[in-house]
Image (tube, rainbow, N blue to C red):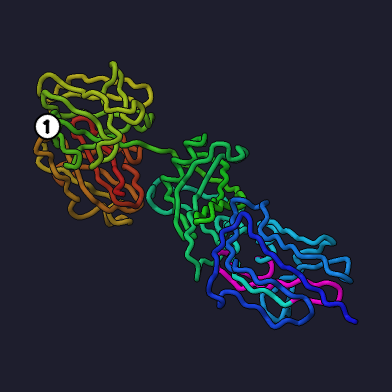
């Protein structure tokens, strides 16, 4: 007589999130195909928890049956017909346990998608006999890390200092599909100096549920310099994407492979603008604040010659922003960024003309009276040259007129002027009787004895010019 095997089938879920199901529709038992008998369980929904990967996910135990084979096999499938079944494992004991990470990987290998509950069918084989199957929903978690698709490994990014706000690098990556899920992924772009093993990574920025992060020339240049790069030199960096998913079952952090690349930095400059009661704009930080000339042979040294009221003033790096600001601290020229607080003011005791010299690196400064008594006061000042048009026609016709400061008649400015690659000069009264030129781009001190043409690069600028010293500076418009 054929022996009837009767099994008690118990499934326990550990280190997972599950829900008790009173509705029998959540639990599906197929028609028995053998003499195995399964005792139904009311735990039908299982959400795997990445926080405890080595804890048991599923434990199955049963009573040893008479005349049963020596080996029991626990089988899983994603369809009720078990057309593509997967063996979870075998045992000669009367119980079987599989860890969270093992079960999760098997589910992903079987085609289940992360964070999407899917029906899974389980049954036990013993010899030639098979139990009926139990159906329940399991939600796996993502294991594969994001994949950086740009830049390619060992790419070289040449930064453009003449267009600081233009895009220099677009970092892109791919990850699992979130369609149909309720999870959000926070992606963090991290960078570090090559060979540092990310011991002190820089968090460049974060994107939620995205796949792209863009960096401008100035952002990437400043980042490289902060990590030890020299100006106007190649520097090796590494990047990676860290994807973090937070759900009720825990936190899942996945980190992409490291992508090495090289940046070619450019020489960076800080612009300084006057503000305060001693100056034309007063204490308004966005009132056409005059820029002071950066010495062409020392990017840390600045000079301004012009009129000051007998009062206080400071220097700003960005018009419209109070930080960073420069002033005095214990007799030294210092910035709020370095101090961690606002510096004291600079000042002059009486209204008049002065030359202000400051050095952002050494912290030195001086304010020296300037004799402007014999200086010519011009009625007009203009810009002429091929930089106006991009060709030699720019040397003809009327000049582009500067605006004369109502505060200081020797100070002139042009706002929001678009120039082309070429050369320019500055001249008085739309004539060649008095013209200023120099051979240094961006900033310098022009001479009025028909000196060389000032080289300019295409862009949009604010230009400041002093007819007392020939000092000029071109400030790119961002």
Where's residue 229, x and y in %?
Answer: 52, 36
Classify 198 as above or below 75. Answer: above
Rendered view: 365 above or below 94: above
- Residue at figure coordinates x 41%, y 45% from the top left: 218
Q: Which residues are magenta?
A: 108-131
Dividing the image into 4 quarters, which one contains the N terminus? bottom right
The residue located at (60%, 54%) in the rendering is 50
Q: Can you say whether 475 is above or below 178 in the image?
A: above
Please provide percent x and percent y for residue 350: 10, 20
Res 149 → quadrant: bottom right
Name the residue tied to disc 1. 376
Q: Residue 240 location in percent, x, y?
A: 56, 49
Under tag 1, what secondary structure?
loop
Q: From the viewer's perspective, tell me whether residue 445 is left or right of residue 58.
A: left
Residue 446 is at least partly visible in this image = no
Side (left or right) of 201 relative to 287: right
Residue 306 among magenta residues: no
Q: Is residue 95 left or right of residue 136?
A: right
Q: Is residue 113 magenta?
A: yes
Nearer to me, 264 or 111 = 111
Residue 19 x/y as whole percent: 54, 64
Mark 1 residue crowding within 10 angstroms, few (<14) / some (14–19) / many (20+): few
Q: Nearer the viewer, residue 452 or 133?
A: 133
Q: Residue furthest top?
A: 330
Q: Residue at x 29, y 48 (%)?
A: 477
Rendered view: 355 above or below 223: above
């Amino acid at each position: 007589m054929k022996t009837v095997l009767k099994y008690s089938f118990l499934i326990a879920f550990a280190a997972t999130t599950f829900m008790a199901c009173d509705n029998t529709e959540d639990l599906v038992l197929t028609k028995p195909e053998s003499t195995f008998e399964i005792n139904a369980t009311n735990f039908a929904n299982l959400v795997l928890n990445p926080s405890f990967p080595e804890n048991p996910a599923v434990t199955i135990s049963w009573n040893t049956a008479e005349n049963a084979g020596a080996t029991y096999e626990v089988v899983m499938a994603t369809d009720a017909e078990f057309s593509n079944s997967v063996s979870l494992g075998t045992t000669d004991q009367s119980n079987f346990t599989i860890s969270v990470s093992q079960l999760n990987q098997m589910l992903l290998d079987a085609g289940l998608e992360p964070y999407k509950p899917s029906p899974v069918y389980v049954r036990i084989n013993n010899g030639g006999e098979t139990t009926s199957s139990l159906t329940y929903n399991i939600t796996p978690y993502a294991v594969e890390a994001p994949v950086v698709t740009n830049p390619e490994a060992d790419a070289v990014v040449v930064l453009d200092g003449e267009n600081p706000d233009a895009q220099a690098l677009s970092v892109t990556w791919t990850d699992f599909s979130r369609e149909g899920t309720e999870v959000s992924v926070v992606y963090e772009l991290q960078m570090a100096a090559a060979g540092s093993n990310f011991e002190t990574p820089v968090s460049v920025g974060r994107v939620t549920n995205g796949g792209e992060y863009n960096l401008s020339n100035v952002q990437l240049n400043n980042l490289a310099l902060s990590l030890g790069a020299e100006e106007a030199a190649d520097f090796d960096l590494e990047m990676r994407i860290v994807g973090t998913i937070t759900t009720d079952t825990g936190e899942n952090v996945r980190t992409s492979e490291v992508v090495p690349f090289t940046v070619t930095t450019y020489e960076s400059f800080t612009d300084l603008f006057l503000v305060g009661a001693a100056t034309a704009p007063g204490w308004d930080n966005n009132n056409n604040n005059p820029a002071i000339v950066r010495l062409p042979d020392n990017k840390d040294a600045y000079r301004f010659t012009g009129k000051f009221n007998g009062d206080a003033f400071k220097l700003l790096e960005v018009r419209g922003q109070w930080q960073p600001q420069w002033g005095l601290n214990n007799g030294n020229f210092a910035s709020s960024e370095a101090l961690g607080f606002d510096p004291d003011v600079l000042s002059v005791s009486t209204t008049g003309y002065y030359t202000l010299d400051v050095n952002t690196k050494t912290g030195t400064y001086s304010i020296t009276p300037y004799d402007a008594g014999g200086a010519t006061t011009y009625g007009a000042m203009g810009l002429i040259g091929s930089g106006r048009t991009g060709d030699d026609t720019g040397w003809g016709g009327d000049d582009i007129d500067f605006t004369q400061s109502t505060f200081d008649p020797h100070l002139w400015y042009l706002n929001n002027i678009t120039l082309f690659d070429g050369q320019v000069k500055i001249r008085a009264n739309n004539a060649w009787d008095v013209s200023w030129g120099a051979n240094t781009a961006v900033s310098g001190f022009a001479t009025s004895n028909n000196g060389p043409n000032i080289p300019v690069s295409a862009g949009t600028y604010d230009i400041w010019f002093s007819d007392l010293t020939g000092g000029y500076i071109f400030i790119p418009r961002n």
